[in-house]
Image (spheres, helix red, strand yellow):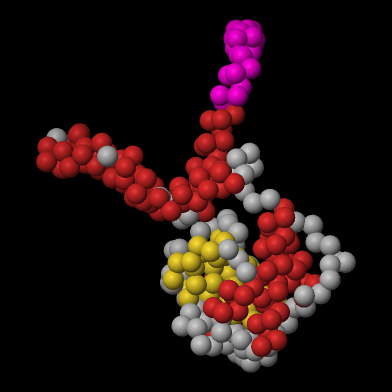
Amino acid sequence: MQTVIENLKLILTTIRFMDLIDLLLVWLVVYRILLLIKSSGAVQIFSGLGIVAIAYISSIWAEWATFNWILEKFFSNLFVIVVILFQGEIRRALAQIGSNPFLFGSNVAQETQIVEEIAKAAVQLADRGFGALIVLEREIGLEYFIEVGTELDSNITAELLLSLFHTTSPLHDGAVIIRKGRMAMAGCFLPLSKNPILDKNLGTRHRAAIGLTEETDAIVIVVSEEKSAIGIAHGGQFTPQVGLSELRQTLYDVYGLKYRTERGTL
């Protein structure tokens, strides 16, 4: 025990301030990589790479010369392969670093603007009797739970949401996916809920919203075309006919913002 304490004291006395900065930078890089893996559904890709790695080790042990040569060529170009597989995520991460190099994310003003644009769009869609599904992706990536539609990667504006869900739009029957403060995809189809005790009066749009939230931590805003009402699906539960204040409160909670009830009406 005494030896361990002496070794710890020796390590602490030899650590320089620059070593702490070095460790902090490594931690930031590892943290961002883990976030990338978690949010992009990359766990499955890395699982596949792990299987290939096991096959490579097995080929060495079993002396499969040809198979080993193929896998050796694969791993010699692994860096290029990873860049190709994650080019979209890498591009977005670098863009975030460029816009906010210290926090690596959106600032409060940007997130507040996003919330207000989504709330404004939902209210106007309900007023005009347009049906809509607006999905807010959270920690769990959605690519493996939805049928991907058209990629957008655009800023969030109420006007664009209104045009996408207009009955003349070819994408109006699908859902819009909001990811990391941007409209990532439109025209996406969600998995229908298999819950047998759901209200029989719920339509396909509502069942799709509930179905996605049964499998992920996403929040789905549902605008009913028939009732011209706004509902929220989360955790497999559906709250129908929410008011503007409740909608805003939910959106502010998603982005970790403080909701001020004195805000004016849209």
Return the residue found at the far right: 262
Residue at 75%, 56% (x, y): give it.
257
Percent coordinates x, y for residue 113 in the rendering: 70, 62
Q: From where the camera sits, is residue 127 visible?
A: yes
Residue 27's quadrant in the figure?
top right
Residue at 48%, 79% (x, y): give it.
171
Residue 112's quadrant in the figure?
bottom right
Quarter that holds the N terminus: top right
Numbered-mark total: 0
The residue closer to the viewer here, 117 or 234, is 117
Percent coordinates x, y for residue 266 in the rendering: 77, 75
Percent coordinates x, y for residue 191 in the rendering: 49, 75
Percent coordinates x, y for residue 25 in the rendering: 56, 30
Residue at 54%, 58% (x, y): give it.
140
Q: Is residue 162 left or right of residue 88?
A: right
> Against 189, is 8 above or below?
above
> Against 217, is 242 above or below?
below
Q: Is residue 77 left or right of residue 100?
A: left
Q: In this view, does 181 lie to the left or right of 41?
A: right
Report the span colored magenta. Answer: 1-23
Return the residue found at the far left: 66
SS assignment for the magenta stretch, majority: helix
The residue closer to the viewer here, 254 or 163, is 163
The residue closer to the viewer here, 205 or 130, is 130
258 magenta-colored: no
Q: From where the camera sits, is residue 191 visible?
A: no
Residue at 46%, 70% (x, y): give it.
146
